[in-house]
Amino acid sequence: MNEPQHQGLGSTLLERVLPMQRNAQVEVHYDTKGLRFQLNAPLAERRLLPDY
């Protein structure tokens, strides 16, 4: 699988938003079997959404 020429919402979330918002480390790999990614992020210390 070749690296895509277009970057969509999913790629943006994985490669830009998660590292900035959650201090995550993201590795994305494109190979012949498809997309593989590794995500390492700290657990949230508090709930980001209100309790309902």
Image (tube, grey):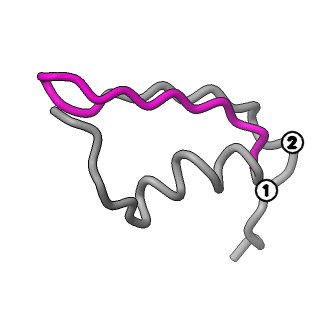
**Residue 28 lies within the magenta run:** yes
**Residue 39 lies within the magenta run:** no
Compared with 52, 18 (above or below) is above
Q: Are marks 1 and 2 in contact (CB under 8 Å)?
A: no
Q: Residue 25: where, in percent of width, then height?
A: 66, 30
Amino acid type, residue under disc 1 in the picture? Arg
Quarter of the view holding residue 5: bottom left
Main secondary-structure element of the magenta-colored stretch: strand
Amino acid type, residue under disc 2 in the picture? Glu
Q: Quadrant of the C terminus?
A: bottom right
Q: Residue 16: where, in percent of width, then height?
A: 63, 52
Which mark, by number, is residue 47? Answer: 1
Q: Is residue 11 left or right of residue 35?
A: right
Q: Residue 50: where, in percent of width, then height?
A: 77, 73
Q: Residue at x 86, y 42 (%)?
A: 45
Residue nearest the observer in this picture, 33 or 7: 7
Compared with 28, 44 (above or below) is below
Considering every residue shown, the one lying at the far right of the view is: 45
Q: Is residue 34 left or right of residue 51?
A: left
Q: Residue at x 36, y 26 (%)?
A: 29
Q: Quadrant of the N terminus?
A: top left
Considering every residue shown, the one lying at the far bottom of the view is: 52
Q: Secondary structure at mark 2?
A: loop
Which mark, by number, is residue 34? Answer: none
Residue nearest the observer in this picture, 13 or 3: 3
Q: Residue 8: where, in percent of width, then height?
A: 38, 64
Q: Is residue 21 left or right of residue 27?
A: right
Q: Secondary structure at mark 1?
A: loop
Q: Which residues are magenta?
A: 22-35
- Crowding near pointer 2: few (<14 within 10 Å), some, many (20+)? few
- Crowding near pointer 1: few (<14 within 10 Å), some, many (20+)? few
Which mark, by number, is residue 45? Answer: 2
